[in-house]
Image (cartoon, rainbow, N blue to C red):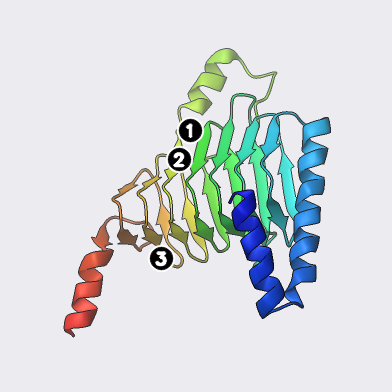
Amino acid sequence: MNYLELTHKLIHILLTEPRLLFCYFKALLKGFGYIAYFRLFKPNIVIKFPFFVYYRLKISGPGKVFINRGCSVYANSFDGLVITTLSRHAQVIIGKGCDLGGMTIRCSNRISVGDFVMSANCLLQDSLFAVRRQPNLKRADQVEREKTSSSLSIGSRVWLTGQTILLAGTDIGDESVLGVGSLCFDRKIAKSHLAVGNPVVSSVSIERLEKMVSSG
């Protein structure tokens, strides 16, 4: 979302539903406060303006977090957005224009979320065990523990519906949907597919589903 798009959106809200303008500005101001705070006190966390915070936001841990412009944090069954990095080399990257509601992220290695992703209450975790690095552990034990961690990738325009869990090795293609209550572990979902199951073992093309519905 660039500044021209932001201006158009503000004008549209003012003309159609002026009462919502207060909530919109409040979320924008709150988001700006988070951006300023992280820039001053936590340089490992970078959030691009504009950023809209309608509900609670919590980011902690030693790793790097990047949230691109135009993202919004909404209320859901759980906290709006909770991000925890579990090691210094951990990276969380969230694309632009994402609607994040009830999302919890626990990152040991790398978790990337594409542009315009929409989420209900869901968990993204790239390791089997969400345990922080422990300095007293021997190096061999640390390496063995990190073998259970791998990257997690979500494409653009993906819909993560309610009560979904994405674990290590998951790769969701662009414009795909993860069905309610689904668990995805070490699975690649192709572009424009619907994946359902606990755990997910296969997916079906959304285009094929649309054809089945239209023919029926």
Q: What residue is shown at x 73% (from left), y 74% (from top)? A: 20
- In this view, the residue in front, 28 or 119, is 28
**Residue labelled with disc 3:** 179
**Residue at 47% over, 60% down:** 160
Q: Dots 3 and 2: beta carbons under 8 Å?
A: no
Instruction: Give the residue number, with chain letter if any, for mark 1.
Output: 149
The residue drawn where x is 53% and y is 60% is: 119
* Camera sees residue 188: yes
10 Å crowding of disc 3: few (<14), some (14-19), many (20+) = some
Decide: marks 1, 2 in contact (CB < 8 A)? no
Quadrant in the rendering for residue 39: top right
Residue 129 location, x and y as percent?
Answer: 55, 39
Q: Kindly identify which residue carries mark 2.
A: 152
Q: Residues within 10 Å of mark 2 (few under 14, many from 20)?
A: many
Give SS at disc 2. Answer: strand
Image position, residue 35 (x, y; %): 76, 42
Amino acid type for the residue under numbered disc 3: Gly
From what the image shows, is residue 10 above or below residue 188? below
Mark 1 is on which residue type?
A: Ser
Q: CA distance from mark 3 to mark 2?
A: 18 Å
